[in-house]
Image: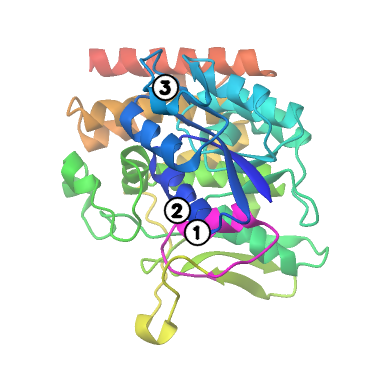
Amino acid sequence: MRTIAILGSTGSIGKQALDVAAAYPEDIKIAALTAHHRKEELFEQVRRFQPLAAGLTSGEVTIPDDVKFCKWYFGKDALRNVVRDIPSSDVLVAVVGMASLSCVLEARKKGKRILLANKETLVAGGHIIMPLCRMDHDNPSLIPVDSEHSAVYQCLQGAQGNRFRRIILTASGGPFRTWTKERMMQAQPSDALKHPKWSMGSKITIDSATMFNKALEIIEAKWLFGAQSHEIRVLIHPESIIHSLVEFEDGVQLAQLGTADMHTPIMYAMQYPKRKPSISGRLKLEDVGTLSFAAPDTERFPAITMAYEVLNLGGMAPCVMNAANEVAVSHYLKGHISFGRIFDTVRHTLDKLSDLSGSDADEILLGDMKARAQAEQYISQN
């Protein structure tokens, strides 16, 4: 049995992980649950799954009598303290932002397996995290939960020790795949939040619309699979049936196919190495009919080009790109800036701060703060 602490249990990934746990109580025990501010939802989850501990990062609240049976943690250190104190075999990192970095480092310090659904951790800190992790298939200490990287990881099981030639990350193209650049740059948040295939949280849905999600995934692929920038490619695939591919030297490409449902990669990570019956729909290719593919339009979606740029720059450039994007998306969702200003904000911040260095967690967090401040300043002055 796997005992799992879920960081971010009231978010989209966290709730779907609990669906998996509920379907397989004989295989999965929930050790801990955490949320940021959705306390009532967290209380209900605690009642249902009876964890050893729970946490709220937004601060201390009054705990109802019927959930006082577990240990409670509050404040900005709640996540790390839960990982440190509560016994578990696995930690599902499903929180957004840099708060995850210390949690992942703590999990590895405790010898726990990381189920990673957070992009920022590897984008900003891959150089300090991956030396602590194993990505083999016999006894991995980190398993990616992102559908694309989960697909690559599964495809590499068929490599039999052979190195890949290329990793091909697929992308739906988001809600603006067919929009003109002029129309897209003025898109409203309500438009950007209508993803054609995936059900996700608001931040990652906007990232899908800008394709910054794919930019971050390019950087993640470098760290997860030891890929060089020229070995990572993006392929637009609107049907979202092929989740990624791996090409080998002999020209053979292995692909992982499935429905556009995050329950599948979540369950793969939580149950690894076992494969259990799906709790979501099964793929029927005869119903899909046609699969289509195209190269990404980097003029309309400059995030892809920025990803390769920051990979080649190295250092803190990926962290700066991520931080600036987070700030810009937050302002966009609040109606403060236009869709096109997201790209402008990231570009400006990169130009100002791409030469920062970050050799440890403290320096990474400091660089993240500097990038956020620079992005905020740019938005306020333009």
Label 2 – label 1 distance at C-alpha: 6 Å
Q: Quadrant of residue 202?
A: top left
Residue 349 disc label: 3
Q: Quadrant of residue 82?
A: top right
Does 64 appear above or below 173? above
Q: Residue at x 46, y 34 (%)?
A: 8
Q: Which residue is mark 1?
A: 23
**Quadrant occupied by the C terminus:** top left
Q: Which residue is mark 2?
A: 19
Q: Are marks 3 and 1 in contact (CB under 8 Å)?
A: no
Question: 112 or 237: which is nearer to us?
Answer: 112
Label 2 – label 3 distance at C-alpha: 39 Å
Instruction: Examine the structure image and report whether residue 359 is included in the region drawn in magenta.
Output: no
Magenta segment: 257-277
In terms of sequence position, does the residue under pointer 2 or pointer 3 come before the other?
A: 2
Confirm whether residue 232 shows in the render. Answer: no
Residue 331 percent coordinates (x, y): 26, 25
Secondary structure under the numbered disc 3 in the rendered image: helix
Q: Residue at x 58, y 61 (%)?
A: 151
Q: Are marks 2 and 1 in contact (CB under 8 Å)?
A: yes
Q: Amino acid at mark 3?
A: Thr
Q: Amino acid at mark 2?
A: Asp
Label 3 – label 1 distance at C-alpha: 45 Å
Question: 22 or 11: which is nearer to us?
Answer: 22
